[in-house]
Image: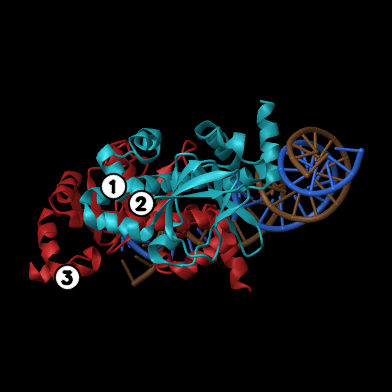
Chain colours: A cyan, B red, C blue, D brown
Amino acid sequence: MDNNFKLYSNIFHLSEFHFDKFFPLLKTRLIEKSGYFLRQGDRCQYFAFVKSGTLRSFHINDKGADISYNFHFSGQPFTEYESLLSNKECTLNIQAVEDSELFLLHKDDLKNLYSVDSYWLSYGREMKEMLYLESRKRIEDLLYFDPETRYTNLLKKSPHIFRFIPQKYIASYLGITPQSLSRIRKRISKS
Amino acid sequence: MDNNFKLYSNIFHLSEFHFDKFFPLLKTRLIEKSGYFLRQGDRCQYFAFVKSGTLRSFHINDKGADISYNFHFSGQPFTEYESLLSNKECTLNIQAVEDSELFLLHKDDLKNLYSVDSYWLSYGREMKEMLYLESRKRIEDLLYFDPETRYTNLLKKSPHIFRFIPQKYIASYLGITPQSLSRIRKRISKS
DNA sequence: CGTACCATTGATCAGGTTCAATGCTCGTGG
DNA sequence: CCACGAGCATTGAACCTGATCAATGGTACG
């Protein structure tokens, strides 16, 4: 257990005391490449942390287009909040880009934590704040910049994405087609 | 005080007990039409609720373009979180579209509440969750739909915006120019 | 070696942008 | 009370960028 604390401190950012309450609640799940953690229309029961691997959440719109909403890398927390919080059918698919291993926290266990110790309320609030600020940045990126600048912004902020994620998935994350992304890259490499 | 509780219950959504702790911490501020609550580069000290009126938050980008980030109507909470949470210089201007009155909660008072009673941690967490879910919808809207659909979505979701906000401000909120919005409206009115 | 999938490239198209001119409306001052 | 001006919406024309459709090229994996 002590071992685990050190091993996973970079994922959970908890004190040892709180880690010991937290960790036993987690299940692990293995998802093979191309396997799904969640599909559009499911209801999401778990809060998840990526132990290893990479996942992609994406939406299939009414025209059948596959649009990346986000990517989830080793060490990052994620879930389908809309569904988790309001028990609605979720609008996202979450799929493993490569073999991945997850830590799962059931939403009932999360609620329990909230009621047991206000520490977890702070933890939850801070996590929501982080998520909110990230979303805000994404909105600003989409609103304030043109496709080419969005690409260079992403390249600067998250170069690792380009090592693991096929370009066509990155394109829709940027709000453009794979062809346009290819042309933007070409344009930039010349300048 | 009891009077205030009833009067403002639709803004704060608090029990009377908690309202009585909360309300005395608030200051009110009047902002005349075109006056600023905040300017790009300021540091934000307050969490705010719109008592009456309407405000608009917007960003001036490096090309000098005015881009609406959001609108804030009577009864809604808002702030510049990035600045409030991390004490960074804020990237948004927040300006009164019409004469407006605000309730202000100082961030130190908010922190105090958090430490005094875990009820406020839940309150804070839930507010962040709401904000996060709203941001998520906004991202999805920008990613999944073309400008025309974004316009009709907005018309469906928030028709009141069109009663109070000049079209040119709505255009940049949708990520397009005023001219394009005008043409989209024309196109739609014909079909 | 062959297949499947992805990136690239070319040609054409559509829609949003830009620049410029005109119209409209509301608020202000003569 | 009317006339004017400011600011915004609309419209037109030319342009440009990204989308689409289609073909080719490259690469990894069975």
Q: CB of mark 3 within 8 Å of CB of mark 2? A: no
* Horizontal relation, residue B109 to residue A150: left or right: left
Provide the chain ID for the residue under circle 3.
B
* Horizontal relation, residue B1 to residue B6: left or right: left
Helix, strand or loop at mark 3: helix
> What label sits on residue B87 in the rendered view?
none
Residue B82 placement (x, y as % from top left):
33, 42
Residue C4 placement (x, y as % from top left):
79, 49
How many residues crowd around disc 2 within 10 Å: few (fewer than 14), some, or many (20 or more)? some
Hey, what amino acid is under mark 1? Lys
**In this rendering, does residue A127 appear at all?**
no
Of B129 and A174, nearer the camera is B129
* Horizontal relation, residue A36 to residue A74: left or right: right
**In this rendering, does residue B91 appear at all?**
yes
Taking the spot 53% from the left edge, 42% from the top edge, the residue there is: A145
Quadrant of the rendering where the C terminus of chain B is positioned: bottom right
Q: Which residue is mark 1?
A: A21
Helix, strand or loop at mark 2: helix
How many residues crowd around disc 3 within 10 Å: few (fewer than 14), some, or many (20 or more)? few
Q: Is C13 above or below relative to B40?
A: below
Q: Which residue is mark 3?
A: B7
Taking the spot 13% from the left edge, 68% from the top edge, the residue there is: B16
Provide the chain ID for the residue under circle 2.
A
Hey, what amino acid is under mark 2? Leu
Hey, what amino acid is under mark 3? Leu
Q: CA distance from mark 1 to mark 2?
A: 8 Å
Provide the chain ID for the residue under circle 1.
A
Q: CB of mark 1 within 8 Å of CB of mark 2? A: yes
Residue A138 placement (x, y as % from top left):
47, 46
Q: Is B131 above or below relative to A4?
A: below
Q: Which residue is mark 2?
A: A25
**Residue located farthest toward the left when viewing the structure as drawn:** B1
